[in-house]
Amino acid sequence: MKQHNPMHPGEFIKRVYLQPNGISSNELARQLKVSKGLVSRLLNKQTGVSTTMALKLSKVLKRTPESWLMMQNNYNLWQVQQSINLDDYHALALA
């Protein structure tokens, strides 16, 4: 099912995990064993969830890596759909 303006994984992490539980971005960075800068960029939608980050997030935040990658993919796809015009593209006639 197509989503309307899906949430970036970083925003999801802030709203669902960090804010309600009083967890800082620095603490998340320590748990993920990544730099504070990387977590900051993720939370501020300046970078996305890589496969490596999806595995780390799955362990630390107890969601499957597939769910993190799907969330990132849905966000990326929706963003591109807002900026690309496909009117001049047509399906091939396939057997």
Image: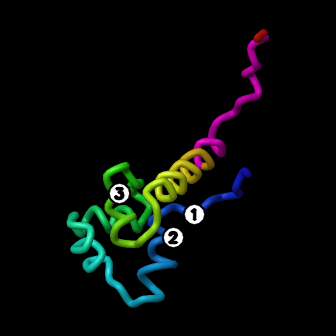
Q: Residue at 78%, 9% (x, y): give it.
A: 95
> Sequence order check: which comes first, mark 2 or mark 1?
1
| Residue with the mark numbered 2 | 12
Q: CA distance from mark 3 to mark 2?
A: 16 Å
Q: Using residue 23 as the reference point, say whether residue 94 is left or right of it.
A: right
Residue receiving disc 3: 55
Residue on which disc 1 sits = 7
Q: Give the magenta-colored segment's residue range.
A: 79-93
Give the class, few, some or many, for how many residues have Cα within 10 Å of label 1's Cα (few <14, many ≥20). some
Residue under the point 51% across and 78% down: 15
- Secondary structure mostly taken by the magenta-highlighted segment of the chain: loop
For the residue labelled by badge 2, is the local secondary structure a helix, a strand or a loop? helix
Q: CA distance from mark 1 to mark 3?
A: 19 Å
Residue 91, image x, y percentages? 76, 19
* Other residues around mark 3 within 10 Å, as few (<14) / some (14–19) / many (≥20): some
Residue at 65 percent of width and 42 percent of height: 81
Q: Is residue 32 above or below residue 19?
A: above
Answer with the quarter of the image where residue 46 lies. bottom left
Query: Quick one: label 1 or label 3, which is nearer the N terminus?
Result: 1
